[in-house]
Amino acid sequence: MMPVPQPDQSTLETWLQTEWLETNGLGGFACSTVVGCNTRRYHGLLVTDPHAGTTQPPAGRRVLLNKLEETLMCGETAHDLSTNLYVGTVHPEGYHYLTAFERHLWPTFTYDTGSATLRKEIFIPHGKNLTVIRYEVVEADEIVTLMVSPLVSGRDFHHLSNASASDSPAIVSQDDHLSVALFGDVSRLWLWHPQGRFSPITEPQNGCWYYSFDYSREAERGLDHIEDLFCPGRITWELQPGESAVIIASGTQVGEPDPDELAAEEADRRSRLLEGAGDDSVTRQLFFSADQFIIERDGGKSIIAGYPWFSDWGRDTMIALPGLTLAIGRHDDFRTIMRTWMAHMRDGLIPNCFGEDRSAAYNTADATLWMATALRLYYEQTGDMDFIAGPVYDALIEAVQHHIAGTRNHIGMDAEDALLIAGTGQAEDGVPTQLTWMDAKIGDYVVTPRHGKPVEINALWYNALRTTQLFAEKLKAPEQA
């Protein structure tokens, strides 16, 4: 458990830089600061492609639920538990009530108003496009009222929303189900709030807007940082000590799943992840963190290059693959991820990255070479030539042959010195290229052009050749050694 110091302005600044993350294994996630104050455009309680895990075309990741405004009524006194940065001010200042934060299996927050203690848990079940938010009244002098107001945008997660730019909100409330859409069905958020009473905002209009949230981390990056969020109304529960309230947020209509069953299944899955982690808290957290980066991709698996805004990149996948799988005994995941990327190999290159629309780009001189490094590390740890033989070995031979003969983006071996040329600065269509890890590009301007024969590319090339030679000798294919 992480105790929260007695709050003051310096404490707030510290906690605004301390963030938590939940992921769903589909590329979606929830994340924010420990005090629940969003400081990035990527912060939210449900950030996901609503079509992830379905047969529908990808819609790209969207911020479906930005946050929940929470108020605990104890008698006649209202305690606002939320914290927000608006332009020029902090309101409300709910961080004053936060007494503890812990991340055992998932983020858990404890609030103390003096007359009541409330615990909040946030978790995402693996493989599901939903977030579970559970509240429990741990102690209270009397019955308390919990009031929760959803704030939504439904936007692409790279952008920001503005009240004047949204469509007319579509709000549907029936029984314990609520849905809100600001930009058509692709932006629709579904909320299930069992036993919670929804009170819509109808005057002066259908719902209302909260204006001018100020995202400090975006300002630090020199980007737009002001956003408006929409509120359809308020959900209310009357709770006695020991009673709970639940909200399940989803990108699709989920029916009425049992939240206790979801929690038990996910707790069991996460506990099994820790087998072999021992008792050291740092090691256990690293086992958890490794799992968060492994996602489903086209019936296989891949690795997210980083949260909150990256997708899966070939270079990053192959560099991280041994550490995220081999180091913690996840050999099956290593093999699945390797097969997934090899299935997308074209002209001897694995993709540089996948887009939000699942398209693949091949502007990389080193991702495929890192693949060879990962395969060698797999063999050195496992001695498993059965996996290397067959399609994996064939893909490695194909990659080497294409690099020798020359492939896309003018990547190829110089016959005079056998060094690898990482492009000529332009692709076949004349577009400027950036093919190494120093890949910053603004429009057609390549910030650090490194075409020619970069040193680390050729170190990887030499390693790829020696790895191929090793496997050829083990498979008794001397003509390819």
Image: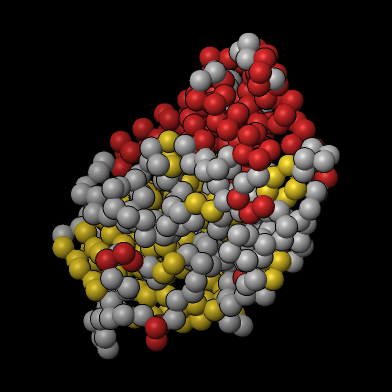
Give the total of numbered labels. 0
**Image position, residue 438 (x, y; %):** 73, 56
Q: Residue at x 24, y 63 (%)?
A: 178
**Image position, residue 54 (x, y; %):** 30, 47
Q: Residue at x 80, y 49 (%)?
A: 453
**Image quarter (top left, top right, bottom left or bottom right) of the C terminus:** top right
The quadrant in which residue 462 appears is top right
Q: Nearer the viewer, residue 146 or 273?
A: 273
Find the residue positioned furthest to the bottom: 204
Question: Horizontally, is 218 left or right of 345 in the view?
Answer: right
Question: Horizontally, is 235 left or right of 435 in the view?
Answer: left
Find the residue positioned furthest to the front: 416
The quadrant in which residue 59 appears is bottom left
Q: Nearer the viewer, residue 233 or 228?
A: 228
**Image position, residue 174 (x, y; %):** 16, 63
Q: Nearer the viewer, residue 22 or 4?
A: 22
When the figure is inspected, residue 336 is found, relative to residue 153, above or below; the finding is above
When the figure is inspected, residue 451 is found, relative to residue 401, above or below; the finding is below
When the figure is inspected, residue 191 is found, relative to residue 418, above or below; the finding is below
